[in-house]
Amino acid sequence: MEAPEWYAAWRQEAMHELVAKQEQARAAYRVGEWPRFDYSATAGTLTFSEGGIAKVVADIQIVGTTGSRDWLWSWANPHWADCAIDEMHKVRDFGVRNGIEELTTEYLEDDDLNALGWELTALAARILGAVGAYRPPSDAGAVFLVCKSYRFVS
């Protein structure tokens, strides 16, 4: 896929940044440790709870989904609520401006869709200034989210 010369290093830096952000979210908000999660595309939120009580809420953007053989960017998927994907157009626009084909191609194929999903999510997090990301556990396909903010709820 076409991309500028600087892109490979920039992409790798985005992955390292996301790993650090994930560690911070885990330490500060116990992201990934709560027994339950629920995301709402119509509200643009991800809620972590325990014993039926919401503990942490994140404002999210849906980055994309994996199927059995490919990745689909959320900006190309008409089924998502606008509030859950509106900022993802900035990711596509960044790709257009910089000639990065993988950010502007609706469907992408890869042998390891989970790894591709995390890499593309790291790019989206970097471009949008997100503070973390989440991939809800799933046996079939996956949804990748960036978290714009986290907050405790009482």
Image: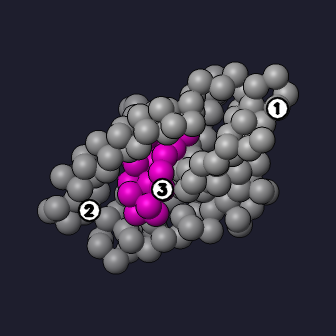
> Measuring 79% from the left and 57% from the top, which residue is drawn there?
42
Prevailing secondary structure of the magenta residues:
helix
Quarter of the figure with residue 94: bottom left
Q: In the image, which disc is placed on residue 130? A: 3
Q: Mark 2 to mark 1: distance in Å?
A: 47 Å
Q: Which kind of residue does numbered mark 1 sit on?
A: Ile
Residue 80 seen: no
- In terms of secondary structure, where does tag 1 sit? strand
Read off the residue under disc 2.
Answer: 2
Whole-number angstrom distance, CA of label 3 to CA of label 2: 25 Å
Mark 1 or 3 closer to N-term? 1
Q: From this viewpoint, which residue is outermost toward the bottom?
A: 97
User: In the rendering, at what x and y percent does residue 114 appear?
Assistant: 46, 33
Question: Label 3: few (<14), some or many (≥20) within 10 Å?
Answer: many
Q: Residue at x 29, y 42 (%)?
A: 16
Question: Which residue is tagged 1?
Answer: 53
Label 1 neighbourhood size at 10 Å, few (<14), some (14-19), many (20+)?
few
Q: Is residue 84 magenta?
A: no
Q: Label 2 sits on what residue type?
A: Glu
Asked if residue 18 is positioned above or below residue 83 in the image, the reply reads: above
Nearest to viewer (mark 2 / mark 1): 1
Residue 75 percent coordinates (x, y): 58, 63
In this rendering, the answer to whether 145 lies above or below 68 is below
Which segment did they paint magenta? 116-134
- In the image, 58 versus 88, the foreground residue is 58
Residue at screen point 43% across, 39% down:
24
Q: Secondary structure at mark 3?
A: loop
